Amino acid sequence: MYSDLKLLGTYVSWENINMLLEMSSQTAKRANMSEEKLKKALTKSLDDLKAVETKLEIKLGPKSVSERKHEFLGVFRVTMYLFFLIGQQFVVGTFLSFY
């Protein structure tokens, strides 16, 4: 199980989770749920991921070039999804400034 978590942990994208938290009011509205419920679920997920890092001493997030490419594509997909989901314009420069 430890080796599975270690492998899967490389595909955790802190950026995606934080982006969803930042956009929680719009995301919750489009998902037909309360913002409070969405924030609570995302916060619990973050707490669980941090517990894995702390208790199992597994560093989550991409490490290799291919894992970073996967994260980049994931962030891009979430950005585009939120763009269409929310119906408002994203500032592409902000997204690209991370890379």
Image (spheres, helix red, strand yellow):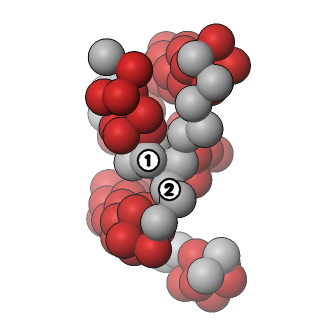
Residue 91: tell me if it is visible: no
Q: Which element is circle 2 on?
A: loop
- Mark 1 touching mark 2, by CB under 8 A? yes
Please report the residue visible at 39 percent of the width from the left and 20 percent of the height from the top.
2
Q: Which part of the image, by quadrant, shows the N terminus?
A: top left
- Mark number for residue 10? 1
Q: Amino acid at mark 2?
A: Pro
Q: Which element is circle 1 on?
A: loop
- Residue for badge 2: 62
Q: Position of residue 86 (x, y in %)?
A: 40, 56
Which is nearer the eye, 27 or 7? Answer: 7
- Mark number for residue 18? none
Which is nearer the eye, 70 or 90? Answer: 70
Residue 74: tell me if it is visible: yes
Residue 11 position (above or below residue 7) = below
Q: Amino acid at mark 1?
A: Thr
Q: Position of residue 48 (x, y in %)?
A: 54, 16
